[in-house]
Image (spheres, helix red, strand yellow):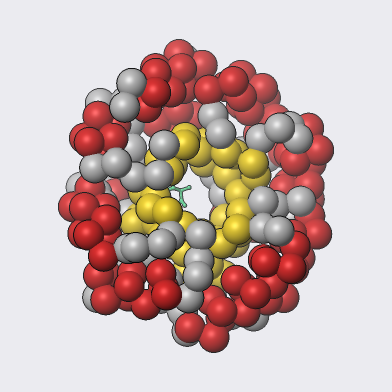
Amino acid sequence: MKLQLALDLVNIPEAKEVVKEVQEFIDIVEIGTPVVINEGLRAVKEIKEAFPSLEVLADLKIMDAGAYEVMKASEAGADIITVLGATDDSTIKGAVEEARKHGKKILVDMINVKNLEQRAREVDALGVDYICVHTGYDLQAAGENSFSDLRAIKNVVKRAKTAIAGGIKLATLPEVIEASPDLVIVGGGITGHPDKRAAASEMKQLIAQR
Ligand SMILES: O=C(CO)[C@H](O)[C@H](O)COP(=O)(O)O
């Protein structure tokens, strides 16, 4: 089980500071969608150059032009690129084919997918690397989480790895770990903690005990 740090509310220098603090406890660093909007793919490039031993995920949440956007993120140094599960199969197929050309991986974000199990089966058959259940910020604010969604996709996904994101904190991590995802994605649970290093370290220990 891997731990991914999601960076959403920082600029590039701040991102580097946070990663420096917690790098020994994380496997993947995510350049979040707001960071890409503010800083562009330069953020991916700079973080990959600064931390070459970490995998870097570009959270582009691709909805169209899958091949082109994966090509651009790959050129910037991303190891994993996100595509939305709600989009058309042709976009996901294009993204997967392009990722293969560059030796990169595709994570499909199932945010706001209604027919979750059926779509997870379909997306799995398209050859993606990760399928991720995700409660976004707006639904987190309404008290929702993706814990039962994770259990649901674990029952139907046969070849992709599974991942979960959305509001995971130290207190809720044990419940997440219980459902055995391959990847746990944590943003505010680390970046919003008064001691980021301690939070990341404790999360890594909880995951390692599994
Ligand atoms: O993709 C995202 C928002 O759309 C976030 O990166 C993801 O939800 C993880 O952050 P947090 O743990 O703070 O919810």
Q: What residue is drawn where x is 34% and y is 45%? A: 181
The answer to which quarter of the image holds residue 62 is: bottom right
91 with respect to 74 (left or right): left
- Judging depth in this view, the residue of 194 and 118 nearest the camera is 118
Residue 66's x, y, as percent?
Answer: 62, 76
Quadrant of the image for the C terminus?
Answer: top left
Residue 108's x, y, as percent?
Answer: 47, 64
The answer to which quarter of the image holds residue 102 is: bottom right
120 lies above or below 58: below
The answer to which quarter of the image holds residue 170 is: top left
197 lies above or below 4: above
Q: What residue is drawn where x is 28% and y is 35%? A: 177
- Judging depth in this view, the residue of 160 and 167 nearest the camera is 160
Mark count: 0
Q: Is residue 7 visible in this depiction of the protein?
A: no
Residue 147's x, y, as percent?
Answer: 22, 48
